[in-house]
Amino acid sequence: MKKKVAVVSVAHAEEAARLADLPLEATVALAEVAGAIKDGLLAFASATGLVVMHQMMEAELTQIIGEKHAKIGAPQRVGNWHGNAKGSVVLGGRQVKTERPRGRTTAGTEIELDTWKAFNSADLLNSLVVERMLAGVSTRRHVDVAEPVGKELEAKTKSLSKSAVSRRFVAATTKAMADLMARDLSGLDVAVLMIDGLDVAGSCVVASLVITTDGTKVPVGLWLGDTENKTVVTALLADLVSRGLNTESGLLCVIDGAKALAAGIKKVFGDAALVQRCTLHKRRNVEGHLPKELAAAIDKRLALIFAQPDAAKGLAAAKSLAKELEADHPDAAASLREGLDDMFTVRRLGVGGELAKTLTTTNCIESMISIAKRTTGRVTKWKDGSMKKRWIAAGMLEAERSFRRVRGYKGMPKLVDALHRELASKVTPAVEDTTEEYDQAAA
């Protein structure tokens, strides 16, 4: 049930008394927050907010059990006021000590106030801690960047030590990682899966991102290993399947070109998945095998080849270039030929324009990974693998907050139809022999 939000008005003491009977209006006497006014607007707002919160709690308890000084045993009385209890609420990025009104039912059980539960929730402070940590604020500096709440409230604030900040961050990122790894994928209409790895203090974290049929990007998982090997990739993909990733309508998998990724995709998805290798990675790999005076010219030719709308012509041109390089630069030629057919999968499906540019590279997932790397930039000591996964998971979810639909998303229906046709062409229809046909064959 939705609750009405109290309207706040600032009034002098006489006005406050006159307006006391208005049930939906919280009133604040200037005398109650006079000290905070001297400390600035934010401090004044914090002090006012605390006063309003107390009024909201009293109004809620009054609604449940009646007026505070009503006669005990009044008709239909369900409970009684029971003094105050000490506690703390989150205010201005701090835990501020305060009190809350208590109530007990006629059966003797404590009455829980929704207002208190909302303001007392540790989730508010945990979220703030995570945001600050991911923004690069060290555990020592959290007190320094907190919003000003005024001297009076500051005196009631619980200290937020370095270790307390660290504990909150660990708890919040552990939950974030658990939520990410437990996401139900059965409700996602997935057309594209992107996989890429990143190095975190000597360990390889393999991350995955899906793109739905309407162009929405969703981070879905990560797996930790020593290298980007087939075992790690297979475990990651199997986990996605167990969480509901559906490949019955076909799936396009975009990877950086690593053989382990392609092998893992083939093992888990079989013919249901098509592989598109990143054209940018291929260009960089070929360039690395060429002398500087030739690399720029070859890269320019490769860029034009991979942008060729006709997949057959593009593939033929790439093979021709590899043949040219064979004599003087055999390693460059071998690098170009490796997995060459997979460089033109998107074009072969008939996808062009902006969407083709998007899906022929791993830029979407690399952008997410770059944000995750940036959030870990200030970490100097990595304790264990769990810490690495927590930080990367938090970074992935932080990146998701700024996600937009992929460029060229209006072309997604064309890709989906092409994947359906491609998958249907690989399925051999079963032939059901009737008894009559069997008898004729036997004769």
Image: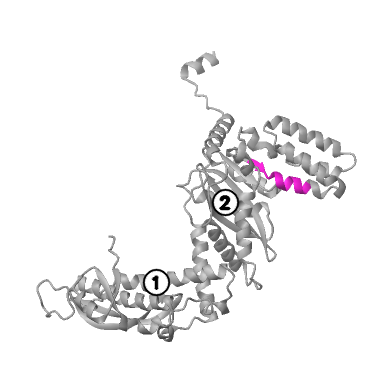
Q: Is residue 140 magenta?
A: no
349 left or right, relative to 39:
right
Q: Which residue is mark 1?
A: 121
**Disc assigned to residue 209:** 2
What percent of the width, then of the height, locates residue 13?
Answer: 25, 81
Q: Quadrant of the C terminus?
A: top right
Identify the element where label 1 is drawn. loop
Q: Nearer the viewer, residue 206 or 23?
A: 23
| Residue 364 visible in the current orientation | yes
**Image height of 406 relative to 106, above or below:** above
- Magenta stretch: give its range: 275-285
Q: Amino acid at mark 1?
A: Ser
Mark positioned earlier in the residue sequence (2 or 1): 1
Q: Is residue 84 left or right of residue 289?
A: left
The residue furthest right is 328
| Depth check, front residue: 17 or 130 | 17
Q: Main secondary structure of the magenta part?
A: helix
